[in-house]
Image: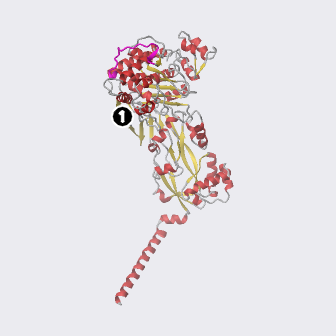
Amino acid sequence: MNVHKSRHRVIIFFIVFVGVVFFSRLIILQVFTEKYKQFAENNVLSRKIIKPPRGLIYDRNGKILVSNEAIYDLMIVPAQLKLDDETELCRILEITKKDYQERLVKAKQFYHKPTVFISNIPLKTYGVLQERFYEFKGFFVQPQSIRKYPHNTAAHVLGYIGEVNREDIDASENYYKQGHNIGKSGLEKVYEKDLRGVYGEKYVLMDVYNTEQGSYLNGELDRPAVIGKNLISSLNLELQLYAELLLKGKKGSVVAIEPETGEILAIVSSPAYDPSMLYGRERSANYNSLVSDPDKPLFNRAITAMYPPGSTFKVAMALIGLKEGVISPSTAYGCPGGYIIGNLRIGCHNHSSPLNLQQSLTQSCNAYYCHVFRNVIDLNKFATIYEGYDNWKTDVLEFGMGKKLGIDLFNEAKGILPSTKRYDNIYGENRWKSTNILSLAIGQAEISLTPLQLANFSAAVANRGYYYTPHIVKTYVDNGKYYRKIYDKHLIDIDSANYKTIIDAMADVPNIGTAIRYGPYFKEYQICGKTGTAQNPHGDDHSVFISFAPKNNPKIAIAVVIENAGQGAHWAAPICFLVTEHYLSQGKQNEKTKWIQDIMVKGVYHPIIIKNKDLDEEDIEEIINGDIETETTITETNKDAGE
């Protein structure tokens, strides 16, 4: 009996003790703790997310390509919403009641969390709301920044940002919240984690009128936002703008690389778009308009479009022929108007014959490279056509053709180097030979490359046998410290001595070769190049040109592709010459070449100018101004003027 009484007393004592502890704690929290006193005097504790400014993007010379501009978003916390009449709010915001209800339904998916109700409200609207928030409980304004483009250039490279979707939120493990922005394309997407910074938090106390009463606990729980890292790109702003000017009204691209480093100096895709179109309240309408545009301005032709390289590929074939030992600089072949074997004929334009290696490149002889290709594929050391072809393909891949180069942009295409299986499907297993695929020798048929790959190949030749991974971002800046990014060096398994004849030939192309119409006007820059006319089964041929300059210690390597523009000498070559001149002369206008610039910018070429090398400047000016009715549109070609 006594045992039971003792247990009973212990239980009562324990219950009383626990009650005293809870009661004491309650008194301490409510009477002596300041933060709960503040809660008692105020209605709502609001947690606000502080969006950091995104990092800026500069060109190689410190000129701003992307900056920030302050805007205001109207936020809502649906759980706190108290609104007697939505009509007045709709009037201030200049939206319909239907629009209001649709936005409210969307916001209620995040019932207790702040979400964007309307982004980028005008400053005037922000001022009106600030004075009347007591009428619109549950709403508040959050400042943030949007991207600003001082020069409206390089849209495909810089990219754009947009509001996160559910997929973005889930992929970030809920780092992002509804209403946050994220890079959607270009550098904004590739370097999102560097540019975005770190979100901060601020706790504020709100009164019954939904007005801020100050920070909570003197900001002890607040966490400041950390600004994003700045990026220093490799782009040269003036060169980028100039290349865009030359491509205005055309479809195509220009890619310029610094051979010594692999840094992209300019990368243009045309047609382009104004990057500021994809920000603000008109973003959705503008985006739909760009997507539906048949000219595909959102498509980055520089890294995603694939074209037959045409005769520019003969440079690679010459180097492979030297590597495999099937030709030497003195090797000569005749050209009776093309390469003829049995019923097969690959035509060629008029030139002297026979030609040695250097002359074959300068005059762009098709027959010569048909011989080289067959000799490489059919070498005695290979037991089958499959071994010979795969060996040739391995040599081509070393130049960075037919594979992704790893540029710091999304959606890079790898190009097309057909496999033996593809030819098995076309001709049957063990039923095809080198003559069936002979068009590969001159960069036609199934081979397709991107302008980036062509520019990179030109840089590799300029370097006499190596290239660095082409890239846009050189350096990033974090807390005032500069960090240089390191990129891989790729060596090509070809003796550097083999490049001499090839480069000598490329140096002749603008002066006595297929680009002679415009080349001599740029002689001082020692440009080495190669023309190409890429056959296009869907329309007129594409104009292609690759080059580097100067011949020794080259500073710039370029590839130009102009769609449906005919021969490489007519459009791609002069654009390439002008871009080279602009860069090496540091933007100085050359009056002696201004007439060529005028032709390129106006988007017409003139057969009389191309054919007649004895015209004086006055005659040329009359033709350019339309005083002589001989203009020909960009889509036409002059087959007698060289390649």
The residue nearer to you, when weighing 263 against 247, is 247
**Residue 507 inside the magenta-drawn segment:** no
> Coloured how?
secondary structure
Marks counted in the figure total: 1
Q: From the viewer's perspective, is 357 left or right of 283?
A: left
Badge 1 crowding class, 10 Å Cα cut-off, few under 14, some 14 to 19, many 20 or more, is few
Vertical arrangement, residue 285 with respect to residue 554, above or below: below
Residue found at x 59% / y 22%: 602
Furthest residue toward left: 381
Circle 1 is placed at which residue position? 488
Dot 1: what SS?
loop
Q: Quadrant of the N terminus?
A: bottom left
The prevailing secondary structure element of the residues shown in magenta is: loop
Report the magenta residues as a range: 322-342
In the rendered image, is residue 280 in sight?
yes
Vertical arrangement, residue 186 with respect to residue 392, above or below: below
Vertical arrangement, residue 88 with respect to residue 7, above or below: above
Furthest residue toward bottom: 1
In the rendered image, is residue 440 in sight?
no
Q: From the viewer's perspective, is 615 left or right of 380?
A: right
Give the percent coordinates (x, y) of residue 459.
40, 26
Give the percent coordinates (x, y) of residue 277.
58, 38
Q: Given the image, on which type of amino acid does mark 1 rest? A: Asp
The residue nearer to you, when weighing 86 against 291, is 291
Give the percent coordinates (x, y) of residue 7.
37, 84
Vertical arrangement, residue 519 with respect to residue 270, above or below: above
Give the percent coordinates (x, y) of residue 567.
52, 20
